[in-house]
Amino acid sequence: MENRILGLHHITAIAGEAKLNYNFYTNVLGLRLVKKTVNFDDPYTYHFYFGDKVGTPGSILTFFPWEGMQSGRRGTRQVTEIGYSVPQNSLGFWLERFEKHNVIYNKVSEKFSEQYLTFLDPDGLKFELITSKNEDTRLPWETDSVTAEHALKGFHNVSITTNKMEGTAKVLTDIFGYKLQESHVNRHRFVTDAVSTANIVDLVEAPGESVGHVAAGSVHHVAFRVKDEQALMEFRDKVIAAGLQITEKIDRNYFYSLYFREPGGVLFEIATDNPGFSIDESVEELGSGLKLPAQYESHREDISKRLAVLD
């Protein structure tokens, strides 16, 4: 059976203050802190993974919170919006919750026959809560204040803004197996039928718009999902055959990765399902301890002292 891209794996963004980021995603949005670790290249900076109960691919939003980081600017050559799937009839709950927590939001609108609610996180990262027209049976993480009837189920889509979409579209269709489903004005929706959720990429073509600046409140990269390392390396060959440069396989402890920059300028990652987030913590304990890459374990005491206290 042919190995396929299984939609989105995770999305990684940049934040400013770690505690503010942690509190917003766990307390306001009601996501689970699936993993608390550090940046592989900067061990004195956290790497947070937020998601559902077990850290299912397609639900994982990760952050590098760099204290004092300047704000980014949305523009082309970027992922400019992250869409989360929420249950039908839940947007009223989120409007009230955003009012209560002083979250910046816009009125409910509609595109591609789906209602959505736009909001910004504390660093200005742009999101949409979307009531999908397709059934989403994923089981979300629940908290006392955000129960299953309202909770974020996982990703619905990502939106990439580009000056010219041809090269990006070619990667999605020719390498990743997506198909153009529909277009509205300058927004073009690409979908894979390999999975039924977290399977949409919107390309927004804006020829005259200026290039964005990636910093706090910006997406660093978007990762696409494959089942295992064999599939990962097959896609490495496909990317190389398309004339694009791509990294060697990288062990990220919870998955294996490849990185390449697509022609429109966005950093793409391909990541495996294996070994998963329960490799070093039980499902019940996910996110409770500080997990360090092996090369930093001997520096645990120093690293722990320099990381922000979250509680």
Image (cartoon, helix red, strand yellow):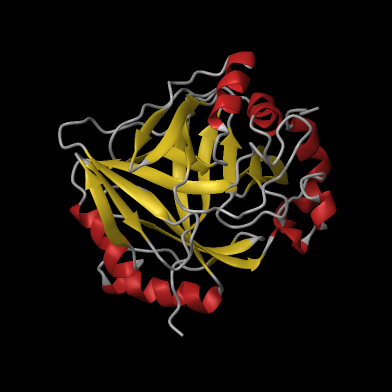
Q: Residue furthest bottom?
A: 1
Q: Which residue sits at x=59%, y=50%?
A: 59
Q: Is residue 74 above or below residue 166?
A: above
Q: Is residue 127 left or right of residue 101?
A: left
Q: Is residue 1 above or below residue 28?
A: below
Q: Is residue 192 above or below residue 93?
A: below
Q: Is residue 122 left or right of residue 30?
A: left
Q: Which residue sits at x=76%, y=29%?
A: 310
Taking depth in this image into account, of 88 and 171 the one nearest to the observer is 88
Q: Position of residue 1 (x, y in %)?
A: 46, 85
Q: How many marks?
A: 0
Q: Which residue sits at x=81%, y=27%?
A: 311
* Residue 41 appearing in the image: no
Q: Position of residue 147 (x, y in %)?
A: 72, 37
Quarter of the image where one finds residue 158 = top left
Q: Position of residue 253 (x, y in %)?
A: 66, 61
Taking depth in this image into account, of 153 and 42 the one nearest to the observer is 153
Quarter of the image where one finds residue 138 = bottom right
Q: Position of residue 294 (x, y in %)?
A: 73, 58
Q: Which residue sits at x=23%, y=30%?
A: 210
* Residue 62 appearing in the image: yes
Q: Is residue 183 left or right of residue 276?
A: left
Q: Residue furthest left?
A: 208
Q: Residue furthest front?
A: 89
Q: Is residue 100 left or right of residue 221?
A: right
